[in-house]
Amino acid sequence: MNMSEQPRILCMTSYEKGQAFMQECAALGCRVVLLTVDKLRGADWPRAILEDLITMPEGLSLEQVTNTVTYLARSKRLDRIVALDEFDMETMAHLREHMRIPGMSRTLTSHFRDKLVMRSEAQQAGALVPEFTRVLLHEELRDWMGKVPPPWVLKPRSEASAIGIKKMNSADDVWRALEQLGDRQSYYVLERFVPGDIFHVDSIVSEGQVVFASVSGYGKPPMQVMHEGGVFTTRILERDSPTARALVEMNARLIPALGLVRGVTHAEYIRGHKDGQFYFLEAAARVGGAFIADVVEAATGVNLWREWARIEVAHLRSEKYHEPEPRGLYAGSVLCLARTAEPDTRMFEAPEIVLRLKKHHHAGLIVRSEDPERVRALLEEYAARFAREYLATAPVPDRPTA
């Protein structure tokens, strides 16, 4: 690339997200092309900064997407291609290799998409991982279930959040589930269920080092909220607490060991109720969903989408990335599925409220304070009130809806 030219970045997403990433790329002097699905043509994209907005039908094969992008590349030089959403990561990894564009390979992408692969890699790196097994040789499965007591969880290897996860209480449960899955059963992993408190660490990685990490704790486990209903909460932990320090250290070792060179991560860990140990659950090379990025920004001033863009552009230009200087406030969010399409949250009036979340059929707030205990108390109070005022339940979707 002639460095006097404006570099071009192709962004792909099947969901409405990543606007701040695209805006930051444009602000840094890049041309931005967005590839998304037809139904999102009218979504709230930053059209003023886009060089082009291209849409395609949902459900295209890998070959069809490849043909779409390589046709575009006949007339537009693509210097980087970025998947803004979890479900487009493998597609973009394939395109990078096919088009010889720098970035994460298909193998490396699997470390952050495939739950079987990431567990194997984390275990080899020395992290504690709940006992797990591939779903392949049935004799191997019988042997594993004979050694590891239930309950277990049967997880899709390449889904996000708690989508598709099922709790199994006996071998009969497992065999029935596998019979229903048929030829799809090898796309699952079976894992010991570890009751515990679940935390997430949201990180920025530059040249193989974690240069920023924010540690948060969920209220109810996301799997419980997804399958049983309820109010979702998460809050940033006291930074000098033993839990936060332990998770920062564990995350700083593990993410580079998984192979990420640069970008952002959302990793989840569990502290077992029985033994108090921290176990690795999963890691994604993307910005966390459920408005987690907004919580991180409210507390630290660090916008993970924008930092991700800065890392990509710095590498593209062979420049050094300079990590942000975070502020030391605390924040948390409360969010639930709502019975009404546009729930009114004006009855919540605490001065700590900094954002009222706008999402169809959802109620949500983000609060911020210098005092982490104040954030915790507000979330507990608001979660109970949300359950009374707004909470609706719905079947677990086959795929995320946002």
Image (spheres, rainbow, N blue to C red):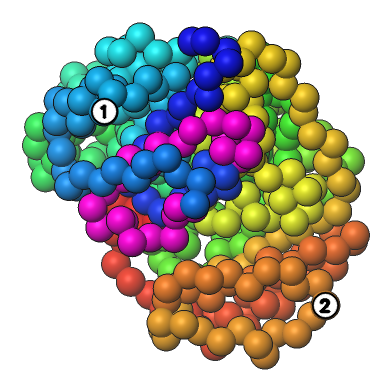
Residue 214 shows up from this direction? yes
In screen coordinates, is 305 left or right of 380? left
**Residue that numbered label 2 is attached to:** 351
**Residue that numbered label 1 is attached to:** 72
Which residue is pictured at 71% across the width and 60% down the height? 332
> Residue 43 lies in magenta, yes or no?
yes
Residue 279 shows up from this direction? no
Which residue is pictured at 61% across the width and 84% down the height? 345
Q: Of the residues tagged 1 and 2, which is closer to the observer?
A: 1
Is the C terminus in the top left, top right, bottom left or bottom right quadrant? Answer: bottom left
The crowding category of the residue bearing disc 1, from other C-alpha atoms within 10 Å (few below 14, some 14 to 19, many at least 20), is: few
Which residue is pictured at 41% across the width and 26% down the height? 81
In screen coordinates, is 352 left or right of 230? right
Q: Which residues are magenta?
A: 24-47
Residue 68 point in image, percent of width and height: 20, 31
In screen coordinates, is 344 left or right of 212? left
**Picture quarter containing residue 35?**
top left
The crowding category of the residue bearing disc 2, from other C-alpha atoms within 10 Å (few below 14, some 14 to 19, many at least 20), is: few
Viewer-closest of 84 and 121: 84
